Amino acid sequence: MQSGWSVSDSDGTAFTPMVVLELAEDTSEEAIKWLLSRIRDKEQNGGAELLVEQLLTRDHGGQKGNPNVFLVGSTLKRLLHGAEDVGLFKEFNDDSMRGFTYTNKDNFKDFQGDGDGFLSVAECQYIIKHELDTLRAKDEANVPGYPKAKLYPGKSIIRRLQSKGILYQVFPLHDKEELKRLSFSWYRKVKLSFQPLNDIRHYFGEGLALYFGFLEYFTLAMLPMALIGIPYYLWDWEDYDKYVLFAVFNLVWSTVFLEVWKRFSATLAFSWGTLSRKKAFEEPRAGFHGVLGFNPVTGREEPVYPNSKRLLRIYLVSVPFVLLCLYLSFYIMMIYFDMESWALALYEVEPNFWTGLFLFVPSIIYAVVIEVLNLLYRYAAEFLTDWENHRLETSYQNHLVLKVLVFNFFNCFASLFYIAFVMQDVVLLRQSLATLLITSQILNQIMEAFLPYWLQRRRNKKAHKRLHRVMADQELPLAQQAQLELDMSTYLGTFDDYLEQFLLFGYVSLFSCVYPLAAVLVVLNNITEVYSDAFKMCHVFKRPFAEPASNIGVWQLAFETMSVIAVVTNCALIGLSPQVKAYFLESDTQLILLVVCVEHILLAFKFILAFVIPDVPKHIQNKLARLEFESLEAFKKKKILETSGIPNKH
């Protein structure tokens, strides 16, 4: 547990603090007492039945901390019952992964004595978060002390407090000893080995472990492309015809890579018990609002919002806005081409080292502008998706991902498509691709690694100095550790991390046949990405709550869509090669028909390959079928025993 930390609840029960609740400094006493009573109340009375105590902080250097910070924990028995409520899968005595049940707890591997240590800290924190999120209003008309903060029967209290700005944040505490061990095995020593995915999953949960698994797998899958790309770059650099073979290999690689990844992720998810885990009923988002009505599924009172209004907002506002942003991106792209023409004209008038160097300036400026536009658009997309008022978090994420992907794809690749298929300038295409890729990677490393690290060091400099003067290298007391974590940046999820990999995959799969070193650059980028992301997760960000996941979700579809676009793009690039054009000097129509025919054959091959390679390995399919069969047999046996009146013994 948490490095020996222990606090006591109001009734004297000692517990290990796992989750921190921070309320606004001016929160009314009435609201605080009401919230704490609901958290502590028995489950049968509608409470969460958790343990909670105020974090006592002392003034340091004349700076007073927020007094409304609370530590939340739980008894072991409550956590075990909560594990059953959330559908947690644990390893059974027969080495299979099964849904945990309290009555059958002794038949699970590693459950010894009273079960202390059976659940990981991350699982305990996830259970506590689930219990807090499902804490529902009863007959309260509003949050005590806040007449405008209306409450509806069955409405999540925590979500309402967050949407009204009364509750600032809820986050899990780091376990310093476990974090130190993970850091050492993960990134503190540079070594040629795989990441400790099981340890990452144990500490951060399946969602984050799958991201790092994908990052590692993608990097390893890039190695063949990089190794083949180096000789292509070194020999026959100007011989574009030689890249026809490279383009074909590129197409096969992008398909096989994604199909094998699905099998690998299914294997990971099965070993972690999330592959067959039933998804819990999804609650409304914290920001969802509407008039009071009834949920037809649960029968509970909750806000409802007409789908027709949401669709009007999407099609009359969001879609036109996205199209306007795409037009703006296109306009900026044309300015970039004007700058390229100006730089080229300057070089032709006075060719020397400096004017030759100046040829790269427009591409560098354009690459920086692309990153700035992507960032600004991201904020606009989040605002619009919020305004659309989606009820479920999955719906919100899907619409946000779609908006961001469409713009990022156009913004990053439109200029390359224009150069390749309108200008048909292979030299400029190669130069632009190299400049965009290198500049974007440098900017990403600065924004994702150095900037967060520098800001965190600056933020905590005084606190570290003060604490180290007093305590040297001793373990920080709970109050100081919690205060440090309160000030840390909040990890916003894997969205941006997957988006970066998606764009890198696009650079490699779409145009690497004209710049074979693209794969080499991506491999180098991802190696540093592993270490920088690992450092950020351990020392820059607050610990995120574990999120059960069986795959990478909507991103799998995004990558597969990119691979289909890559087939069309590479076939078109092959058709533009001088070697292929030489066979069709008299008829462009025949060339176009041939390219389309080859493209359809490759797409058919791609889909056949995807069909032939199962998403889930056969041995895992057999194990899942076996578990389903045993569950049905157990259910039949239970029904027979109930019918005959014989008590069912576990």
Image (cartoon, grey):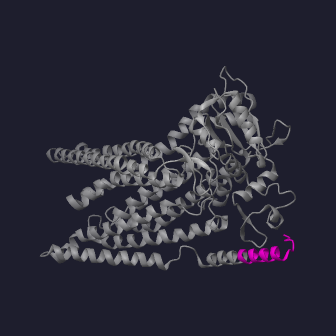
* Residue 141 drawn above or below residue 427: above
Q: Nearer the viewer, residue 442 or 205?
A: 205
Give x and y (percent) for residue 271.
66, 67
- Report whether 433 appears left or right of 194: left
* Residue 209 drawn above or below residue 11: below
Question: Which residue is rendered at x = 39% and y = 63% of the image?
Answer: 562
- Report whether 599 appears left or right of 492: left
Q: How many marks?
A: 0
* Residue 161 drawn above or below residue 356: above
Give x and y (percent) for residue 171.
65, 43
Question: Which residue is rendered at x = 52% and y = 68% of the image?
Answer: 261
- Report whether 571 appears left or right of 609: left
Q: Is residue 646 magenta?
A: yes
Q: Nearer the viewer, residue 378 or 333?
A: 378
Q: Is residue 541 magenta?
A: no
Main SS, magenta region, reads helix
Question: Which residue is rendered at x = 42% and y = 52% of the image?
Answer: 308
Q: Which residues are magenta?
A: 631-650
- Quick check: can you spot residue 15? yes
- Where residue 167 sits, quadrant-wise, is top right
- Quick check: can you spot residue 474? no
Question: Which residue is rendered at x = 84% and y = 77% of the image?
Answer: 644
- Where residue 65 sits, quadrant-wise, is top right
